[in-house]
Image: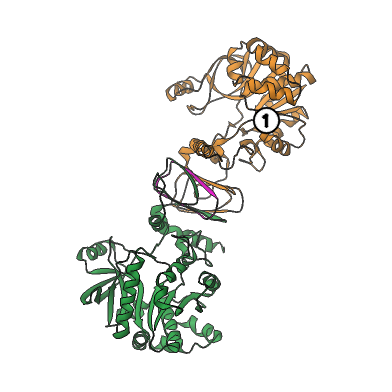
Chain colours: A green, B orange
Amino acid sequence: MNWLVIMAGGVGERFWPMSRKSRPKQLLPLVSQRTMIAETLQRVKPLFGTRVVVVTNREQAAAVRRALPGVKHILAEPVGRNTAPCVAWASAYIVKRDANAVIAVVPADSFIGDVKRYRQVVGEALALAGKADVLITVGIQPNAPHIGYGYIQVGAAVQRGFWKAKRFVEKPDLATAKKYLATGEYRWNAGMFVWSARAILDAYRQSQPGMLKQIEKIKDAKSLARIYPKLEKISVDYAIMEKAGNVVVADGDFGWDDVGDWQAVERHLAKDAAGNAVRGDFVGVDSTGCVVYSDGKHLVGVVGLRDLVIVHTADATLVCHKRDAQRVKEIVGKLSDRYR
Amino acid sequence: MNWLVIMAGGVGERFWPMSRKSRPKQLLPLVSQRTMIAETLQRVKPLFGTRVVVVTNREQAAAVRRALPGVKHILAEPVGRNTAPCVAWASAYIVKRDANAVIAVVPADSFIGDVKRYRQVVGEALALAGKADVLITVGIQPNAPHIGYGYIQVGAAVQRGFWKAKRFVEKPDLATAKKYLATGEYRWNAGMFVWSARAILDAYRQSQPGMLKQIEKIKDAKSLARIYPKLEKISVDYAIMEKAGNVVVADGDFGWDDVGDWQAVERHLAKDAAGNAVRGDFVGVDSTGCVVYSDGKHLVGVVGLRDLVIVHTADATLVCHKRDAQRVKEIVGKLSDRYR
């Protein structure tokens, strides 16, 4: 049977002040009226029914439960250890319940423009992974030389919309990213995977036998608390995918956007007549290109601004230039220093 | 006896969102812990005791009472008619109680840097006005070619720190303002006056006999509501001072600042290590020259900003460049259009 794993461990520092430790990006209704995690589930629910596992952390578990009222399988990590332990744990959890499971693993906080095409790709990947011993990862056709993503070079076609993976590469510098873009052979690594429980556990057995052995010892809250913190903090890409010989890349041509910062939110908000992307109550005088986000009835009034991000929440307000959207986490860093 | 008239009719649109119709600039603790009107009274209280008249408007009367608990004489205009009717009403009110009154008239919302010197100037002006038939206005030595103030050209000295006024001039253009500054003969008109009740009422009798006649008919709330709205909307400078031959200019060398907008507030707030003028909770990353004003425990976090004004209140937030501080009233204009 098909199973869905939603990875919901992010802390979303770049969405401060809306995102906090207990309310990260995936629990915000950033680009629609629903939380991103609810959108994530809703998109593919028909493919999985109730066979949905969410891996999150202790701080967020209660909020995740509220956001996804129908979901029974919620695994709460005592500490974040990146994606390799997370995937191993979810896979071990699923295989105990369904030895023939085929699993799709998706992050909780992506935006998908073309949901119909997305569902088709996931469906085709599940079918392929059900009959072949492959590890499928979704590759996004780059439309810019982005330096914030890992890339995957694709090789020969496996079937329509699927290629053999040739190699994984780390986040490149700009010159390299431009080269990748020009060749047409590279895809962004979107962190979405499809495989059979058998194939992924085999891959762990081969590349991460120690980690898997530890994971398989997790039986209850006590063993979880003892074992999990000792696991290596490593991504599934680095720990498994880059070492595997049976990786297939699916064509992620469904309008994927990881909505990585406030500037990215601009692409999904309605614009006013002056070209400001606005959610909430806003009065702009001679201002354009701004992203204004207010979570209630609070009014934001601006004069003479260009390309600023303004985010108001009940207890904090952010103001920065769009080009500094990635630097918002530096505020969070300063706040942590102050023990807030 | 000496009487003080505090003119508190301003609406303070340039201090939106802190200032509102019911809480204008003079009722804000803008540059100290006390409201500006309380500072205004406190500064010269020893000179006047309880002989203090505040002219305000209906919307603000209750708040003025709260801000100045000891003040008994509060006159609430049914509508604002600029300063000429206001001064006439206060003068007529005072002369009924004290035919020999000497009156100082001051705005409720100025900042004074050197309070001791200020008190000395007011004291000397009261003494002069008590013995001579003069209308004294305070002139501020310009330190920049400001185009937002009226100017007074001074002539021969009357006594130390006092000159005869040669002429009043309207707000100049920049070239003219530069000329005024260069000559050293011009002073900014600060809208602060000292005169005897007799002298000022004589001046009204001569230049505004109709207005004075109407003002003298005000007996109760009913006559006030009938008469006041019909009075001409005109400043005391224009209606009286520019036409009078007995005007004397006092040397306002006491660090006067009318704190005209959020940029001006910067001069009176403490600066953080990075050069941001801050009141409230603030975290700045790579930001300087900003004016950040928050009225509670709300946190303002910024990255990469230069010279921005950020003001947070419970129901609205302002963001603009310092150079646009004067344009904040345009937001208020837009809001009025929306009937807020």
Q: Is residue B145 magenta?
A: no
Q: Secondary structure at mark 1?
A: strand
What residue does disc 1 label? B56
The image shows residue A22 at horizontal and vertical percentages of 54, 67
Residues B332 and A176: in front is B332
The image shows residue B311 at horizontal and vertical percentages of 54, 46
From which residue to which does the magenta span run? Answer: A291-309
Is B44 on the left or on the right of A227, as rendered? right
The image shows residue B167 at horizontal and vertical percentages of 55, 14
Residue at the spot x=34%, y=86% of the render?
A: A199
Q: Is residue B2 above or below residue A170?
A: above
Q: Chain of mark 1?
A: B
Q: Is residue A205 above or below residue B295?
A: below
Residues B221 and B87: in front is B221
Residues B192 and A277: in front is A277
Q: Is residue B123 visible?
A: no
Q: Is residue A292 magenta?
A: yes
The image shows residue A35 at horizontal and vertical percentages of 48, 65
State which quarter of the image contains the N terminus of chain A. Answer: bottom left
Q: Is residue A70 visible?
A: yes
Q: Is residue A19 above or below residue A161?
A: above
Res. A314 image quadrant: bottom right
Residue lying furthest front: A46
Rate crowding at label 1 as few (under 14), some (14 to 19) or many (20 or more) other CA atoms within 10 Å. many
Amino acid type indicated by mark 1: Thr
Residue at the spot x=21%, y=63% of the render?
A: A182
State which quarter of the image contains the C terminus of chain A. Answer: bottom right
